[in-house]
Amino acid sequence: TKRSAVPLCRRTCGKANQQAACFSFGHATHCGGFGKYVYDKGMTDKTEITLETNSGIKYLTLFPENGKVEYVEVDMGKAVIVPKDIPVMAEGESFISVPVEVGGIEYKITCVSMGNPHAVVYLDNIADLELEKMGPLFENHKLFPDRINTEFIEVIDSRTLNMRVWERGSGETFACGTGACASVVASVLNGYCCRDEEITVHLRGGDLKITYCGDGTVIMKGPAALICDGDVDVSFIK
């Protein structure tokens, strides 16, 4: 399908005081919000737009109702599973369900990059996890030279996952678009879910619909809502 190349560009900064494109710190959900903003504010009337980020061109499909965008679908590109490209300090073509000792406990970890590195772990009763204690142990593990975002996943069924996430440099967050995508990719690789099927990921901040396509591309769809708006004096920025 031919997409309309609307010339849009954005940049965000992460808590770790590093420049972060939409997809560099897992904030893929920001791209959906940005798409809603430019449409709702009349900056574009297109429902298929391209968004230039430091991680490459991303393709957004907007779903408006009554003149306002309610849902956004983002083509997240292809998942990366080769350890050296994630990066993970390991040999081979993938890092799937590998036993790793973290904090004196052995976990089976699957690693995926969606433009940023993710470690996915499957556990029961993730609502009871003490992520403030566990998260830093994963984030700073010697296997991960660039540190790591960690998704703790509870499989409900083949089309439903519960997820909590510890983001590098930020701690636990309520939503992580690239983390949800990485979790679905990992779940397909581990046999919990199937390719080309829409998987619902329940995050603490809401639900995302993720599809890991047969060609390796990942599609994310979720709601977009205005929380607040206002004016900021930026004259102090030099």
Image (cartoon, helix red, strand yellow):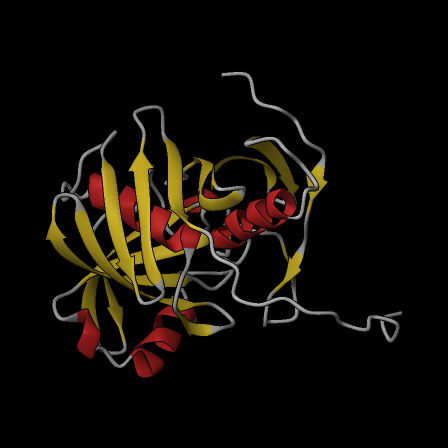
Q: Position of residue 29 (x, y in %)?
A: 47, 53
Residue most toward the front? 66
Q: Nearer the viewer, residue 43 or 138?
A: 43
Point out residue 208 in the picture as x, y percentages from the top left corner.
Answer: 33, 50
Residue 119 position in % (x across, y down): 34, 57
Q: Residue at x 32, y 83 (%)?
A: 133
In this rendering, the answer to whether 110 lies above or below 135 is above
Residue 72 in view of the camera: yes
Side (left or right) of 105 relative to 25 = left
**Residue 164 picture location, percent across and down:** 30, 66
Q: How many marks?
A: 0
Residue at 59 percent across and 72 percent down: it is 15
Above or below, comparing residue 186 to residue 231 in the picture: above
Residue 179, placed above or below residue 219: below
37 sits to left or right of 233 = left
Q: Nearer the viewer, residue 147 or 20?
A: 20
In the image, taking residue 106 as reference, residue 167 lies left or right, namely right
- Nearer to us in this view, 22 or 40: 40
Frontmost residue, 210 versus 33:
33
